[in-house]
Image (tube, helix red, strand yellow):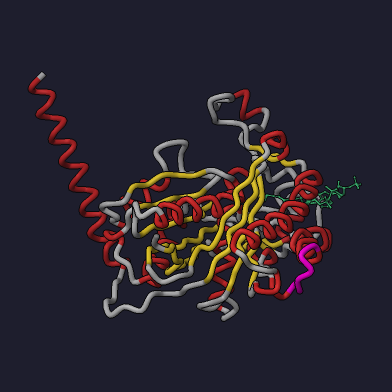
Amino acid sequence: MPYAHITGWGVSVPEPVLTNDDIAKMVDTNDEWIRERTGIRERRIAREDQYTSTLAIEASLKALQVANLAPTELDLIIVSSSTPEHIFPATACIVQDAIGATKAGAFDLLAACTGFIYAVNMAGQSIRSGSIKNALVIGSETLSRFVDWKDRNTCILFGDGAGAFVMQASDQPGGLLSAVMRSDGSGADLLTLLGGGARYPASEATVHEGKHYIRMEGKAVFRFATRAVGSVTREALDLAGLKVEDVDLIVPHQANYRIIETAAKYLKMPLEKFVVNVDRYGNTSTASIPIAAVEAVEKGKLKAGDKVVFVGFGAGLTWGALAAEWTGPVPTKKHVHPEQYRFFARLRSLARRALRFIEGLFSRREL
Ligand code: UT7
């Protein structure tokens, strides 16, 4: 059975920074309260011309570059997002077209802030089963588009960004070691975005009622999260046959510094073993784990051979964890420049659209 290795990684965060002081000009809050209760100092907000796919594409190209893998070699693309570009088509298909992944299947996955854990596991299991060789997994969010900037309970928390992993089959042991996925729909009402779906299709009334905004019962989600992180991390470690002492690094979902602190206490692990960057990006939902992981790699905190646990929790309710042995790029003689494929991808996309148009003209005549 092949192993599923993480061989490439990339991040894309928008440049515009929104500080706590900026938010204090919009709602009744202040920098001190936000820092003390959440650990957040600032977050990134997508420009008007940046979408969930824009960030996903940038992160993907970087991940492919690290893995030295041509987009044409991808078999599968999964975009995990709670803020997809549209209900359909899938954001993953927009990414597939833009990067020129000519033979990849593509779909979106929605498991809120746990989405990246689920998506890496889905791609990993497809590789382990032997049905695919190369996968691209992306967590991408533009949450700022769904934040009620008058609601101080939520608007202080969220930010935009994307992170991507390339996963590849290999006979070398390592890579994904175990995965745990959990859910509890009895808590579905605790964190929601209700408008625009089939139950509350967009209408003047839904907009008037603010159903297109994120709503959260912060305290209840906090209580759930503090329990979930520690216990599911332990489960993933047990499944992988690892002990807490074997772990080099934990990459938790970045929702609140206090949740990470509580998890560290529960697991009796030093806080230094947890990656924390919630201070600079806020809660980027499903993108937070890959963004934090890439930062750890770049700072030399996550190296080839390290045992790492990724752990997430969020709306649904959902939670889950992955244990992995970090691989790093596979040595190769070839040098792929995925960015160059973008030009050909654009040409290909235009040609296919033109062909479809011409086909349409002829089929009309036949009728
Ligand atoms: O990624 C998905 C998972 N999401 C999470 O994990 C989020 C989990 N929840 C949390 O992180 C925390 O519950 C929050 C950060 C959202 C809120 O922190 P809290 O310590 O639970 O505060 P609270 O909602 O209990 O509010 C405490 C007080 C209240 O005032 P009173 O009633 O005690 O007088 C709030 O009205 O703080 C007040 N408050 C604020 N004050 C200043 C609430 N929001 C703010 C604010 N600025 N932004």
x then y, percent, for residue 218: 77, 46
Point 79% across, 43% down: residue: 220
Query: Is 347 left, or right, of 312 in this rendering?
Result: left
The picture places residue 175, in percent across and down from the top left corner, at 48, 67
Q: Which residue is found at the position 29% from the left and 76% from the top?
A: 335
> Can you say whether 269 is above or below 117 in the image?
below
The picture places residue 319, in percent across and down from the top left corner, at 65, 49
User: Quick check: 160 left or right of 91?
Assistant: right
Check residue 102 for magenta coloring.
no
Residue placed furthest toward the top = 367
Marks counted in the figure total 0
Q: Is residue 136 left or right of residue 155?
A: left
Is residue 337 positioned above or below 310 on the image?
below
Q: Residue at x 41, y 68 (%)?
A: 62
Toward the viewer: 173 or 331? 173
Name the residue: 56% across, 54% down.
Answer: 117
In the image, the segment drawn in magenta is 266-271
Q: Taking the image as drawn, is residue 44 in sight?
A: no
Q: Along the line of sight, which residue is nearer the eye, 200 or 336?
A: 336
**Above or below: residue 118 compared with residue 298:** above
Query: Do we see residue 185 in this rendering?
Result: yes
Left or right relative to 356: residue 95: right
Q: Quadrant of residue 295?
A: bottom right
Q: Quadrant of the C terminus?
A: top left
Query: Which quarter of the rendered picture does the N terminus lie within?
Result: bottom left
